[in-house]
Image (tube, rainbow, N blue to C red):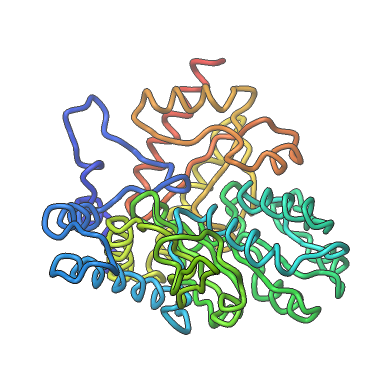
Amino acid sequence: MFDVEKIIQDFPILNQGGTSKPLTYLDSTASSQKPTAVIEAMDTYYREYNANVHRGIYQISEKASDAYEKSRKKVGRFINARNWREIIFTRNATESLNLVAYSWGQANIKAGDVIITTEMEHHANLIPWQQLAARNGATVKYIPVTEQGYLDMAAFEAMLSPEVKLVAVTQMSNVLGTIPPIDDIIEKAHAVGALVLLDGAQSVPHMPVDVQALDCDFLAFSGHKMLGPTGIGVLWAREEILNAMPPFMTGGDMIKHVSFEGSTWNDLPWKFEAGTPAIAEVIGLGYAVDYLNTLGMDNIRQHEIDIVTYALDQLNQVEGLRIFGPKTPENRGGSISFTLGDIHPHDVSAILDSEGVAVRAGHHCAMPLHEKFGLAATTRASFYIYNTNSDVDRLVIGLDKCLNLMA
């Protein structure tokens, strides 16, 4: 049973007390809070079996290695990877995307090729492709976003040709909340021989993601947005693609044999994990996956649809407030970006903070999208498993205060 009040009790930061106003955290799109289970798992590692992995022939090192690799298998099952060897640990989704650009992209993108992405992407899913295209003489094209916050699929179909080698698209917009028609995008991209990369930084924490059912080729996501620690990300790719890719970084654990004449690379997944990894963070991510599995990703998605339904209804009653993105909760995630009359989003955020409501203000690492809508910035409220309708009510009360103060 999805009991939000019980869930809240699992998050120490939401139960601190001793302040004039309790924390209403509405910035999970940027980074989620961490449950006690994750915090304690990392603490236990450092207290009881802190050692490097894969190298030590002694008890605590073997225990650390076992915990590290168990987390990899948990993550693999979480997204239904074909094989745990397809799970590569990185620092974050940004590093995962750059890994693909530098390793697969440098080897496979050439002059005259086309990379397609969208106007709604986070900078991390724009800049690596722009840089790759600049190095190799390729072209980047962008699927337009409509005024309603959807991708222009007719424009996408018109872009498709045998020259398209990669389609890189978010599975859930961090600004608009839009959930694109990924199945259709993948089918059409594959029909012209292109590979498909999904930025799952927003989708993986919030809804079921099955890479086999999707039939995508790459998926990148971050631990800190899905109840896990910072400093740990994941790249999933098909095993045959990873085997053909050259290493991203060299040294440490990614080698099999080194001589003065040359080197050979380790097996997957360690071929892409050079140096001492983020051991505690990987262990913490495994416990975050356990926590999400206990709640059930279908239940999490339904909870967010329910709270976004309520939030859209309440926010639409605030004078002068303009919401960006799809109007129907079923077509969007838990992020709601908006403007409030002529009040600068930074002022909105500061006033809300004085009321104990934490939101994000700025361009949210999506400057081209904001420029398309003629905006310098928006305010963004984002919801997750520990938010309730009362959090929405506190947000609305805070926005009314903004209007009164800035009128």
**Horizontal and vertical percent position of residue 376:** 67, 30
Q: Position of residue 110 (x, y in %)?
A: 81, 65
Residue shown at 23% from the left, 24% from the top: 20
In the rendered image, which quarter is residue 117 located in? bottom right
Question: Image point 54% across, 52% down: which residue?
Answer: 94
- Image spot of residue 402 (x, y percent): 49, 22
The residue shown at (70%, 43%) is 369
Q: Nearer the viewer, residue 239 or 331?
A: 239
Q: Does the rendering let one see residue 206?
A: no
Please, is residue 214 above or below residue 223 in the view? below
Give the residue drawn at x 46%, y 76%: 268
Residue 130 horizontal side relative to residue 84, left or right: right
Which x, y percent locates residue 367? Answer: 68, 39
User: Which quadrant of the figure has residue 300?
Assistant: bottom left
Q: Where the N terminus falls, by quadrant?
A: bottom left
| Closer-to-camera residue (274/383) | 274
Which quarter of the image is occupied by the C terminus? top right
Q: Using the image, determine if residue 158 lies above or below residue 16.
A: below
Name the quadrant containing residue 364.
top right
Left or right? Give the position of 216 relative to 226.
right
Question: Looking at this view, is 91 or 401 the one in front?
Answer: 91
